[in-house]
Image (tube, helix red, strand yellow):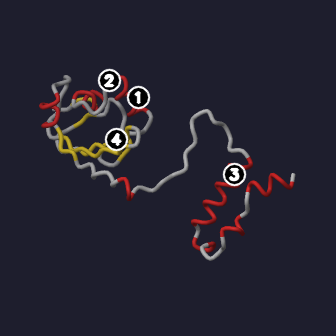
Amino acid sequence: MADRLDAWIWAVRLVKSRSAATALVRAGHVRLNGERAKAAQPVKIGDEVRLRTGDVNRIVVVRQVLAKRVGAPQAAVAYDDLTPAPLPPEERVLVATRERGAGRPTKRDRRAIDRLTAAGSAGDVDQPAEALGNDDEVARRR
């Protein structure tokens, strides 16, 4: 017995809607047995499905093929979740982010980013903080 990949992802409640499942597959965020999948590709018991939704990369193995959406307890039985546990907050790598719509960084922002990246590189560890520059001093010179 085999069913469509997008329908199965929706049936086991990995996404909220069937159209969201189809869009996820078409965007290339779903892999079936290690290869990029198509929405109508058949799913069989034992197949490995990897999907990326937002920040989460899920890895599931098909235990039961479902054609219709079922309740959460039944959906949990239909697959084995092999997704690794997320890192604790203190071990996560902090990445500088900007608010959406904030546009390009200003000159001052770029200098601050350069200071942060230069201070974090291995070659500049011995360099004193004064050598990295001061935005207020630069602004006074103008």
Q: Give the labeled residue for mark 1.
A: 23
C-alpha span from label 3 to label 1: 36 Å
At x 33%, y 54%, the residue is: 88
Q: Amino acid at mark 4?
A: Leu
Q: Residues within 10 Å of mark 3 (few under 14, many from 20)?
A: few
In the image: residue 45, left or right of residue 88? left
Number of marks in picture: 4
Q: Give the labeled residue for mark 4.
A: 51
C-alpha span from label 4 to label 1: 12 Å
Q: Nearer the viewer, residue 27 or 13?
A: 13
Q: Nearer the viewer, mark 3 or mark 2?
A: 3
Q: Return the disc, 2 or 1, that comes first in the chain's sequence.
A: 2
Q: Are marks 4 and 2 in contact (CB under 8 Å)?
A: no
C-alpha span from label 3 to label 4: 35 Å
Q: Amino acid at mark 1?
A: Ala
C-alpha span from label 4 to label 2: 15 Å
| Residue 104 pos. (x, y %) | 68, 41
Q: Give the labeled residue for mark 3.
A: 110
Instruction: Kindly state the secondary structure of the residue where label 3 is placed.
Output: helix
Q: Are marks 3 and 1 in contact (CB under 8 Å)?
A: no
At x 61%, y 33%, the residue is: 101
Q: Return the disc, 3 or 2, that comes first in the chain's sequence.
A: 2
At x 20%, y 38%, the residue is: 44
Q: Nearer the viewer, residue 5 or 98?
A: 98
Instruction: Kindly state the secondary structure of the residue where label 2 is placed.
Output: loop
Q: Return the disc, 4 or 1, that comes first in the chain's sequence.
A: 1
Q: Give the labeled residue for mark 2.
A: 17
